[in-house]
Image (spheres, rainbow, N blue to C red):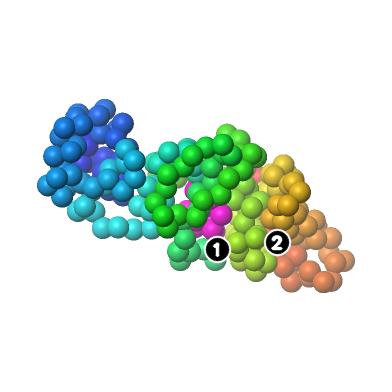
Amino acid sequence: MIEFFQHLRLHDGVAHATVARELGVSWHRERRLIELGILDRPAHRVLRSTTVPESWRQRCRLATLGAGNGVISHGAAARLHNLDGFNDYPHVHLLCRKGSWPGPPDEVITHFTRGLSEEDVTSIDGIPVLSVPATLAILHPHAGDRDTARAIVSALRSGWSASQIRDTAERWRCRGRPGPAFVVNAIDRARDDSRRDYASTGASISSAADQGSTR
């Protein structure tokens, strides 16, 4: 029982019911804790401590603990990765594979894709999230030109290579998905100093690419 509440403290106050069973909390004890108001059940088989303050990171965990095996994506993933321009991003985006039936809280923005692979997913403090290159590949439609360009520069300066970002965007590229094309064009234009119409952003990306190291 103590181990379970330690787990809650280290994981933003939330846990899956499977974890509760592994840490010695039976179904009957779970129900009793809910009746006492110590826990609540915000989603199917997901438990939350009522003593832990609600937070944006808690919302991210709750979204991924529900059915569907979704991962945090778009601007929410950019915030988890500490990319510039997303420090105060308020929304939670969940990306799920097509054919799944997720059950996240109502305020979560849910997306579906056939393109998600294991290499596109990483973990931040136990929260499944799109990798930085995959996040950049689909970011533009929700973030716009300026914030997406800032995120690309931030990723390059943190050590991701321009080739790695571009290759991932190419892999995500398909009809009706505009985000990857923006990233590919941004990297290509940054490499071509003669493109005057994109000079300012291109120069920033090019400079960041020169400073960054290859992961």
Q: Quadrant of the N terminus?
A: top left
Secondary structure beneath disc 2?
helix
Q: Which amino acid, by three-letter code, is at mark 1?
A: Asp
Using a 10 Å C-alpha cutoff, classify the residue at mark 2 as few (fewer than 14 neighbours), some (14 to 19) or many (20 or more): many
Q: Which residue is mark 2?
A: 205
Q: Which residue is mark 1?
A: 84
**Any mark on residue 5, and which?**
none
Stretch in magenta = 72-83
Query: Counting residues from the N terminus, which is met first, the one under dot 2 or under dot 1?
Result: 1
Q: Is 146 colored magenta in this rendering? A: no
x, y percent for residue 10:
29, 45
Q: Quadrant of the C terminus?
A: top right
Residue at 47 percent of width and 60 percent of height: 91
Q: Is residue 27 above or below residue 154?
A: above
Compare residues 149 and 22 and report the one nearer the observer.
22
Compare residues 79 and 206 and report the one nearer the observer.
79
x, y percent for residue 185:
78, 57
